[in-house]
Amino acid sequence: MALSAGTKLGPYEVLAPIGAGGMGEVYRARDTRLERTVAIKVLPGHLSSDPERKQRFEREAKTISSLQHPHICTLYDVGNQDDVDYLVMELLEGETLGFRLLRGALPTEQVLRIGMEVADALDKAHRQGVVHRDLKPGNIMLTKSGAKLLDFGLAKPGGLPKGSSALSAALTAPSPVSPVGPSTPLTEKGMVVGTFQYMAPEQIEGKEADARTDIFALGAVLYELSTGKRAFDGKSQLSVASAILEKEPVPITSIQPLAPAALEHVVGTCLAKDPEERWQSAADIRQQLKWIAEGGSTAAAAAVRGTKRKTREWLAWAVAGMLLVVALAAWMVPGRGEPRYPVRFELSTPGAVYESVVSPSGRQIAYVMMEEDGHAKIRIRALDTLESRVVPGSEDAGRPFWSRDEQFLGFFSRSKLKKVELSTGSVQTLAEVGGVGGAVGGAWGDGAIVYGPRYGSGLYRVSTGGGDATPLTQLDASKRETVHGWPQFLPDGKHFVFLNRSAPGEVNHICAGSVDSKQWKALVDGDTVVGYVEPGYLLFIRSGALMAQGFDAGSLAVKGQPFVVVDKVGFDANLGRAQASISNDTLIYQTGLALRDRELVLLDRAGKQVAKLAPAGPYAQLRVSPDGKSVAVDRVESETGAMDIWVWERERNVFSRLTTNPSNDRQAAWSVHERGVAFSSDRKGMYDIYLKTPKGEEEVLLESGEDKYVGDWSRDGRYLVYVDSSPKAQADIWALPMTGEHKPFPVVQTKNDEKDPRLSPNGSWLSYTSDRSGKPEVYVTAFPSGEGLWQVSNSGGSQARWSPDGKEMFYLSDDRKLMVVEIKPGKGFEPGMPKTLFTAPDGGYAPVERGQFIFSSLVNEGRTSPINVVMNWTATLRKK
């Protein structure tokens, strides 16, 4: 009988079912002692009387307890209550390889990584004398920390009793033999020792199983990951067994021509019929896969991966470039005609690449990279050279896009849409927008640029020569549309495709419009648009994959069915941006997002590190609780770019997740009066304000048709201040009363942008940053009246913070100096002269007790996946 929520098994409280199988049921549960979520595997009472099943259950517990490894599911506890045996294991969030394979083969780099992790786990088990005997995709879980090996229920030294075989057991089993579908491996009672499609010949023949039996199964798994097909398949158990004993699988390169030959060799050796002819240890396989991943095979030799920004990185980049030039020279030799196959390679860079876009000719790539001075800049690299160059005026820039003739590059920088003439370096501002963080892409057409200025807006049009920007599309609030963005022009230079994104829970669409009309129409469901290529395909992202579908650019109509071009492309769900770009000749993409890791450190007033508080991670802003015991951080998810709020408890040194919504949750503000934590979330499309109560419940504090970003909570609990960002790209500061009618009112409302509001400890003063002087400076006004204005910084400033006692204010200057300003006592506000304390680390900060500071300090310059380049890639479309 299934366990209901609330059922207690010892100190564990069942929360919800996760799944069930032949060996019992798995539940999500809470460990009431350690306050952590776990997985509980239960052997129900009616199975406990089955000696074989009970023995297998106990064997699994003993086996897992002896295996401590990062890629093996950890066992926490075992128990029995009311005739119910249970195992307590770590809760793994992710999907099994079996489910992942329903979407097709995996990219080679993922196959190699997963293979190395599973091989390492098997090596650990084999060294402990444990043979898994049931290795298959369904027993490998894909998690954010890598692959995890599961289900050691069949694991033990040895095989079936002498004289018996799995084949005979299966053929004499009382259950009928049923056909095998693509996602239903043969596993039936009576088979005893595994799953047929992944069994080694010796298992089928009833011989002794050893470590090489698992190696055969690993080979079958790697084969399936690489090709999307099973190495041995059939319509019945008998035909599958016959294939394993007598046949060789179709070569991997016959199914995936671009797969490394070395990988085919590794897999083929794993699948040798004779155990003596296989790899003799899982460690051997791990080393072989590592060699391929590091460039040991011919197919991977062009990939030179960068690590740190040192001299050897530039040397590696140059070597990769020379190999690329050789490949291009062979590809472009006159007289050879058009290549009949794609040319693939990886382009490594000495720094983290945040965005990249290929030119219309496919011969140049523009990409955004974090430079040594801490500013993101655009670089251009021609594929037939070894050098890259920084684009003039592109400091703190993003969203680059090419002109149709490649003479100009458009981009967004410091709240402006700009263009640069590449031959002269001349930069011109074309329009005012909401900044790089808000801009939602641009595209260069025939005499006009179409761009998305910010979230909560439709598309705008501006002449390529500059002038007034005019609205082109309008959001439909009744359909919960939240943004029109990421436009890409069609060949005529007049029509374009773009993303029409809606609130969570609604379907996003790829749409088509024209610069000559405000009318547009939906084409296909998709998460974002990538573009159009000849001979007639629309490219877009759906569920993390780069998809293509036939498209008539003349009638603006899709045709046929979509198909996968690249199985996994980096997709920033926060921005709706794909890490992919196309031309008719070249496809470039990255499989992941660029992240900058930070760690929480405690510094004194001289800038000296007192302690390292928390491990490194992709943190953004931080907020310290009023008692100084906890720190809330906005953490970026590596797979999607979305943000969640995590809380680090200083005394316990524990990180826990505060919000788990798949949307963006950010900018926590703590309540002194134990009401909970206020934060901003775009789960309904716009950023609204929510409250997380101490009991873990969530409630809406404020909803409206504009984005709202939480600033601060007054110490008396009466007000919550926030930034209200209007559709006109103006940001003002408002206050939400937490008593009475809860009617918001403006505190600072001007034609300029105000942000980052903070209340003084006594609640009388409000600090904020404004660009009213033409550059960001720190100001203070009376609260809640908004009367009076004092400029605190004198040469640029941001991130103003009050000391816990209110006697000082701190802020960061333009050159990252931490400044301190004494606040003289009295009824009015009287600031002293700013003084320099020290050069601050890159990141957010908060003053805490004893004049110290917590900083989120940068520990690396950015980690990113290399740029994958595929030349003549449309040859694959023609085959489709």
Image: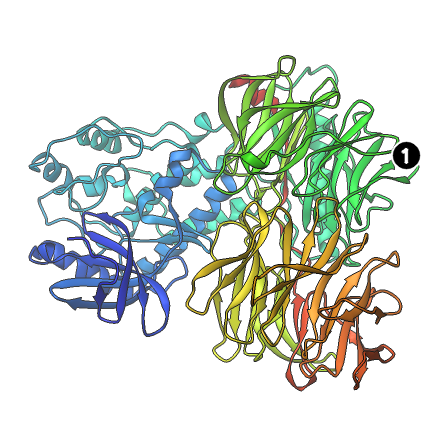
Give the answer, above or below, for where 106 lies relative to 776: above
Dot 1: few (<14), some (14–19), or many (≥20) neighbours within 10 Å?
A: few
Q: Quadrant of residue 425?
A: top right
Which residue position is annotated with label 1? 423
Residue depicted at 17% across the width and 50% down the height:
159
Q: Is residue 128 visible?
A: no
How many dots with numbers? 1
Q: Secondary structure at mark 1?
A: loop
Where is residue 271 drawn, in percent x and y?
33, 38
Q: Is residue 33 left or right of residue 448?
A: left
Question: Between 625 and 880, which is closer to the camera in this rendering?
Answer: 625
Where is residue 829 drawn, in percent x and y?
81, 78
Residue depicted at 17% across the width and 63% down the height:
85
Q: Is residue 418 left or right of residue 844?
A: right
How is the structure coloured here?
rainbow
Where is residue 681 drawn, in percent x and y?
56, 54
Question: Between 734 and 535, which is closer to the camera in this rendering?
Answer: 734
Q: Is residue 512 left or right of residue 290?
A: right
Give the residue type that dot 1 points to: Ser
Q: Is residue 191 visible?
A: yes
Q: Is residue 482 left or right of residue 814?
A: left
